[in-house]
Amino acid sequence: MNPPLTCHVLIVDDSPILRAAIKKVVRLAGVQPERIFEAGNGREALDVMSSVWVDLVLLDLNMPVMDGEAFAKELREHSDLADVAVVVVSTEANRARLERMREYGVRHTLRKPFEPEELCRLITEVLGVATDR
């Protein structure tokens, strides 16, 4: 396991199985378990973010209640949350939709299924952690 990262990560996906898999990779990247939060949709994610500071959101796009696109758009409308790093982790292939996500400030898109090393690299890159992970 890598040295601990002092950041908070929010995993937003409607699949508990995928959240667990992503959480495992985030832990391998060095994020301490107590600094990893989960939400099943965008509305739950905003609720989490109202009480906990988050440095990075790993966001699925296709979810019930509030999808990832609506979440990202609303996130950018909150001045205190607008700079939170967002990485889309999704099966979404619609180029127009993915381009809109960039307009909402999404930094990267990672297509499911993904290699764990690829997600680890993105986490450290987005958070600006200089390591040899």
Image (tube, grey):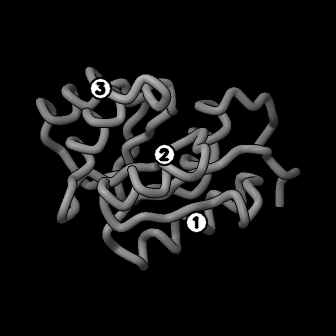
What is the distance, in whole Å, between disc 1 and disc 2 at their CAs?
12 Å
Q: Tell me the distance, in whole angstroms, between the alpha carbons under discs 3 and 1.
A: 24 Å
SS category of the residue bearing label 3: loop
Give whichever of 117, 7 is nearer the camera.
Answer: 7
Given residues 82 and 91, the one toward you in this image is 82
In the image shown, does 66 or 85 lie closer to the viewer? 66
Residue where numbered disc 2 is placed:
57
Q: What percent of the width, then of the height, locates residue 100?
A: 19, 27
Mark 1 or mark 2: which is in front? 2
Q: Quadrant of the C terminus?
A: top right
**Residue at coordinates 29% horizontally, 26% vertically from top-left?**
104
**Mark 1 lies on residue:** 23
- Residue at 22 percent across and 42 percent down: it is 69
Q: Earlier in the sequence, mark 3 or mark 1?
A: 1
Residue 76: x percent and y percent?
34, 27
Tell me the residue at 21%/55% (across/down).
66
Observer-side mark, 3 or 1, equals 3
Query: How many numbered discs, if any?
Result: 3
Q: CA distance from mark 3 to mark 2?
A: 13 Å
Q: Which residue is mark 3?
A: 104
For residue 133, side relative to residue 52 (left or right):
right
Q: In which image quadrant can residue 75 be found?
A: top left
Mark 3 crowd level (few <14, some 14–19, many ≥20, 10 Å Cα): many
Residue at 55% across / 41% down in the picture? 56
Residue 11, position as x, y percentages in the image: 48, 58
Contact between marks 3 and 1 (CB within 8 A): the answer is no
